[in-house]
Amino acid sequence: MKKNIILLSVCLSSLCSVAFAQEWKVAAFGQSTDLNFSSLIDPAKIGRNNAWIAGSNDFLIPGKAYPLPSDFIIESRGGKIANSHDGMTVFYTSVPVNQTFLFEADLTLVQIGPEVDGKSPAAQEAAGLFVRDIIGTPRQEPQSAGFEEFPQASNVLMNAFVTQNKKNDNLVQITSILREGVKNSWGNEGISIKKQAIVKNINFTEKTNIRMTIERTANQFILTTLDNDSKEKKSWSIDDYAGFMNQQDSESISLGFFASRNAKLEVKNAHFQPGTATVDYAKLAPAKARTGKKIEPELLLSSGTKVVGNTTTLQLLANQAGSVALEGSEQKKAVQGGERVQFPVTLNPGTNTFTVNYLVNGVETQQKINVESVSSNIVNLSEIYVCTDCKTDAKGTKSDPVDLKTAVAFLAPGGKIYLNDGQYDGVMLAGEVSGLPDQLKTLVAINKHKAVFVNTTFNLNASYWHLKDIVFDGNLDNTQNKPAYLRVSGSHNIVERVIARNNDDTGIAITAKDKNRLLWPAHNLILDSDSYNNLDLSGINADGFAAKLGVGPGNVFRGCISHHNADDGWDLFNKIEDGPNAPVTIENSIAYANGLPFSKPDILKGSIGNGFKIGGEGQPVNHKIINSVAFNNNMDGFTDNFNTGSLIIENNIAINNARYNYILRSNPYTIASQITFKNNYSIRDSWEGKIKDYLGEQVVATDNKTLTSKEAGEIPQNIVISRDENGKIIYPDFLLKLNPNLS
């Protein structure tokens, strides 16, 4: 980086009044600054992430050095100010990491929020002044067709105009934004963002005379806003500390002006003034400890509190590593965080109280567990029949079935609930009704796919369950999709031969309900199941299958089919601030026509709907996808979705997807990874004028084939996928010839 050259310096105080040959540059970087971000943007303005001198028609050239203009405009139609990362257009300079300074300008907000009818702000729109420890890798110029930009995380301070609400009412507020805890440019667990409104209820179309300032002293950052008309002045400050702005770059920091997501800002009378004082990091407070919320030791009950009979097994889920002992017995077991322990116990009539001692890091806690020995009308607790309108006092037999809630409460480990035909409201299988490791509880339809859950979400929070041959349907009356989808937050479950359709969100999703990653759902198997025509009101969020937003180890999708969902066939997204999910395996599965729900066949080609979206938000997760097929999806067949991990992508087939068949981007970070890309087919009717596959520099590609349909063996115009009576996929002959391992 070039050094700044001081031309003249006259120090009057701790800050100098200087003429300074400071280099200023324009850059656009981060997620949604690419040409593909179009959902909220006037079509004529897609990709406009630029800066220019007022009165000029020429954009400033990215990367070229300029002096600080007296009047310029900065605009970003894409980008976002997210909780843990940014996408923005900036006009910035860099200074030594210990430099104090004052910079300020008169700002006029020209535009903010969507200009498209029917679209509302996303609360991610902003423009103003910033300080960052790093500037993100600039977006591709020019951009490859269909190429999207990676997230860019940084510690940051902003003094900015921000949309005040999610209405197109022209109201903004001047807000101080602080993001801290960022260690990596791809993000990390523990990032936090704080926003504080300094001035509210500003109609930006009327207020054009605001002066904003960011000042850095030897130990503080001070943010100020001044209404030049009323002379009202407000300030906000933060104490500097070691590890804040020197976290990712120990030599320099960047500061300047920015716009993000449909924001356009005019900057006048900009002034940058370096100070004589310097920041001594050795004298600052140490870096803030980022351990997150303290997790107190707790054993979560995973067995019933009402039991028929005189024996049961206490099952307890540990939220961290330690040892568990059952008081009054010799039963004691070491346990890892997220592991369950079982203690067989004998019951007396009435209420039984058990005491368990939980030793964690040398500190022992006690928990009392009450289990009541009760009676029940159910004849066989291992074989219970239910129906939609049955009574609670029935016997649970074929001739006298009981209601579902009662059956769930009394089912013995290893037992089965048989569902008669009919429509059932979604239920919650709580952790307390879990089965045991060698005794899964089963919920199965007597007649395959004739027992249908409707109206409300089915929450599988329990563990050691087997759901089979049932349906989750959000729209049986052909009106508006409802939330009848399946959510799996427990572990060691099997979901087999089920159908999720017509829901107002993702059909089947594995996702956490707890911030403690040791309790994230793990070792679930989704087997031979279908998810289709799931469509939310926005038309952009409902996937077929998902394992996202908190996923533990060992989750597998095998023999599944996802098609005609509003968004993706599979989505393995995770938030940056949660840290990376555990790897997921997808085997022998099919994704087709996603992005094209049945009721909206006119969706813009290439705008939404990937087949397999195998990651998210820059986090490195080593997902594995083998022996799978993606065809005719409305976006990409197989996409990394900014996953920087060492993916394994083997023996797959991609055919005629609207954008890329495969896109595995070179990541812009320092993180090292290697993608195994082996024995995959990429096929199109014709490659003329089509987007070629993108394989980044970290991809190790072997034995892959790019073919036309004719070269692949005369692929039919309409590919038909079905299942046999056992639920196994019936593959067309041409697919089996390409990959016999599909069957």
Image (cartoon, helix red, strand yellow):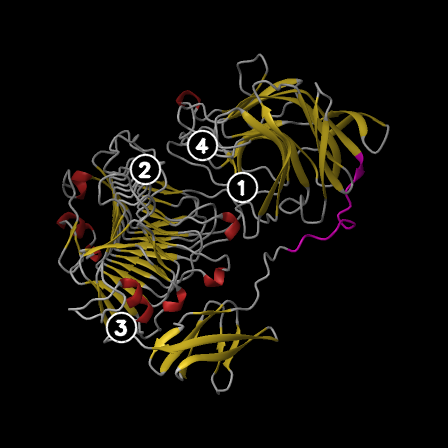
Q: Which residue matches tag 1?
A: 85
Within the image, what quadrant is residue 163 found in?
top right
Q: Which residue matches tag 2?
A: 635
Q: CA distance from mark 4 to mark 3?
A: 54 Å
Q: Which residue matches tag 3?
A: 415
In the rendered structure, which amino acid carries the disc numbered 4?
Asp
Disc nearer the start of the sequence (4/3) = 4
* Label 1 residue SS: loop
Q: CA distance from mark 1 to mark 3?
A: 48 Å
Does the magenta portion include 637?
no
Q: Residues within 10 Å of mark 4 (few under 14, many from 20)?
A: many
In the rendered structure, which amino acid carries the disc numbered 3?
Gly
Horizontally, is 669 left or right of 415 in the view? right
Picture coordinates of residue 451, whole percent (x, y): 21, 57
* Label 2 residue SS: loop
Q: Which residue matches tag 4?
A: 34
Closer to the camera in the image, 132 or 509 = 509
Closer to the camera in the image, 334 or 418 = 418
Q: Residues within 10 Å of mark 1 (few under 14, many from 20)?
A: many
Residue found 48% across the figure and 46% down from its top: 618
* Numbered range of the magenta stretch: 276-289
* Label 3 residue SS: loop
Disc nearer the start of the sequence (1/2) = 1
Picture coordinates of residue 154, whole percent (x, y): 59, 42
Picture coordinates of residue 363, whole percent (x, y): 61, 74
Q: Quadrant of the N terminus?
A: top right
